[in-house]
Image (cartoon, rainbow, N blue to C red):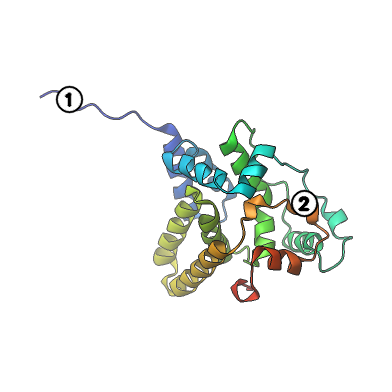
Amino acid sequence: MLPIPLPPLNLEFLKAIKGAATLLKNPNDTESVFDIVDGMRHTDATKLAVAYLNAKPGVADLIAERYSPPTPDLNALLQLPSDSLGYIHASSLTAAGFDPDFYRKLEVEDDLSYVLLRMRQSHDIWHTVTGLSTDVTGELGLQAFSLAQTHLPLPIMLIAGGLLRTLLKSPTNLETLLDKLAIGYRAGMKAQPFLAQKWEDGWEKPLSEWRSQLHIEPATVYVP
């Protein structure tokens, strides 16, 4: 019997699987999230997501422009009015001890790499605007929001891992997690495209105005 040829080993996808396994053990391991993204970069699902985003006029414009502002100065943002996006965002990052420049750097070579970079730059801003918390449950709620908005595969993998971890480690929290996933996804479907926004050009705008403009209603905002 002739040996059956095996398909070529996809080392990038193995990197994504390894990242997913690491994240399942430790949901706070940010580096494993970047490993998943890097491992999924050249999949058909990712290519379809980028095509989906380029079909959205506002998002397509930002992608074509390669809009990439500098890392925000939290001290400067804290001088803005207390109801502004910049002040509220800087306050939440400062209180949590978060570094706005924490994300893994990525060289922009094409539309995909730009989208991934911009998602990393604006991730914490999405938390601020949606009101979804930065704990594990709130993070997965934001991933559901991101899935509705972008169709990227990363949110699917993170949500699947979060559901599996909850079933294995804390099944009594399943209803709460499902609720947050539903809130996030519904909000993402209803909201205007977040990836089309130049947040950094409107730090001084009241957060309430951003939410009204983007159709983020108070009823959909999750406050822990």
Query: Residue 202 versus residue 184: which sits nearer the camera?
Result: 202
- In the image, taking residue 168 as reference, residue 41 lies left or right, namely right
Q: Amino acid at mark 2?
A: Glu
Q: Amino acid at mark 1?
A: Pro
Query: Residue 68 versus residue 94: which sits nearer the camera?
Result: 68
Residue 15 higher or lower than 171, as above or below: above
Query: Which percent across, then down, holds residue 24?
Result: 46, 54
Furthest toward the right, the residue is 79
Picture quarter containing residue 139? bottom right
Would you call the spot at circle 2 few (<14 residues within 10 Å), some (14-19), or many (20 or more)?
some
Furthest toward the front, the residue is 57
Q: Which residue is located at x 52 percent, y 67 percent?
A: 186
Query: What distance separates the C-alpha of mark 2 from that of mark 1?
Result: 58 Å
Query: Which percent across, then down, holds residue 142?
Result: 57, 61
In front: mark 2 or mark 1?
Answer: 2
Picture quarter containing residue 206? bottom right
Residue 200's label in the rendered image is 2
Count of numbered badges drawn on the protein = 2
Residue 137's label in the rendered image is none
Residue 119 appears in the rendering? no
Query: Residue 191 versus residue 43: which sits nearer the camera?
Result: 191
- In the image, taking residue 77 as reference, residue 137 lies left or right, namely left
Q: Quadrant of the C terminus?
A: bottom right
Query: Which percent across, then down, holds residue 52?
Result: 51, 46
Residue 70 appears in the rendering? yes
Residue 47 higher or lower than 138, as above or below: above
Q: Which residue is located at x 69 percent, y 63 percent?
A: 128
Q: Which residue is located at x 79 percent, y 56 percent?
A: 202
Q: In the rendered image, which residue does mark 1 sit on?
A: 3
Query: Which percent across, then down, holds residue 64?
Result: 65, 38
Of labels 2 and 1, earlier in sequence is 1
